[in-house]
Amino acid sequence: MSNSSSITQFLLLAFADTRELQLLHFWLFLGIYLAALLGNGLIITTVACDHRLHTPMYFFLLNLSFLDLGSISTTVPKVMANSLWGTRAISYTECAAQVFLFLFAVSTEYFLLTVMAYDRYVAICKPLHYGTLLGSRACVHMAAAAWASGFLNALLHTANTFSLPLCHGNALDQFFCELPQILKLSCSHSYLREVELLMVSAFLFLGCFVFIVLSYVQIFRAVLRIPSQQGRHKAFSTCLPHLAVVSLFISTGMFAYLKPPSISSPALDLVMAVVYSVVPPTLNPFIYSMRNKELKGPL
């Protein structure tokens, strides 16, 4: 296939060649997907139905659960279908949609986690101003800004990537349509425009990362000044789930995209893609509900 105009489908990386292992992967991903649906669905239903949870923290958690459902639903069902039917094909349109939806969900989730860090900072460092700084209108505006930023980021990258001429076949070394894998198929030097756009996004994400780190530095300083041990424990219990989710999300994504080429291999790339695309949406609901009494009671 000499150029992108002649490509009607891509070939995804197969997990296994034998029928038994394909079915094993189908059942494994089905179990993971059902766990993600159950966990996030329970959080969405509980927060929506219990008026005691209609607070900024749980409003943002509701948005996070929607995004987790969206990100895992973008990749895993296609993997299950391919494993079940023993195929590797995904159409050009499906691939573009998968890239857009996955980037949209992941980008928006990262921006939302930044907003949630600000929520925890105000709750602990400026509790007297919490109602003013994080009123219902402010929360809606911040959530809308996160969704709009994620949408714009995904739209720019998807449109730019799929406008590039592809000269290196249609086989992707990944189990879903991942942006770096599609760029590997592009013609020489044609991908530089997308690399420039990726660098702009990287600086934006770095700014969010610095904001999250500085927020938690201020949070921990404020918590350590709380005189009572019970007060410190309560403050930590509201922050640790968010910090765990942020750490899981950022560490898996950074290792997947920023690991040195010397340790890169197809098997490691595949494992890391599973870890950063499947594990966080599945574990996030359990991390948030594990030690959260306000959430465990209504659940």
Image (spheres, rainbow, N blue to C red):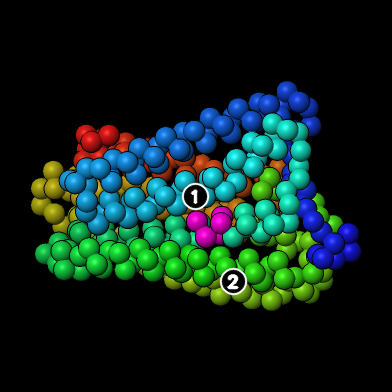
- Element at badge 1? helix
Assess disc 2: are there few (<14), some (14-19) or many (≥20) residues with their C-alpha within 10 Å of its C-alpha. some
Coordinates of residue 110 in the picture (x, y in percent): 45, 59
Among the two numbered marks 2 and 1 on one chain, the one whose residue lies closer to the N terminus = 1
Give above or below for 281 relative to 166: above
Magenta stretch containing residue 103, yes or no?
Answer: yes
Is residue 128 something that shows in the picture?
Answer: yes
Query: Residue 143's mark?
Result: none
- In the image, residue 42 sits, relative to residue 74, either above or below, namely above
Judged left or right of residue 85, residue 229 is left
Dividing the picture into quadrants, the one containing residue 98 is bottom right
Please name the residue shown 52% across and 36% down the image.
33
- Residue at left offset 38%, top offset 58%: 113
Give percent across and percent down for residue 260: 66, 57
Which residue is tagged 1?
70
**Residue identifier under label 2:** 156
The amino acid type of the residue labelled 2 equals Leu
* Residue 191, percent from left and from top: 73, 71
Classify residue 115 by image quadrant.
bottom left
Confirm whether the magenta stretch covers residue 50.
no
Q: In this picture, which residue range is highlighted in magenta?
A: 101-105
Give the residue type at disc 1: Gly
Quarter of the image where the C terminus is located: top left
Query: Is 35 located above or below residue 226 in the figure?
Result: above
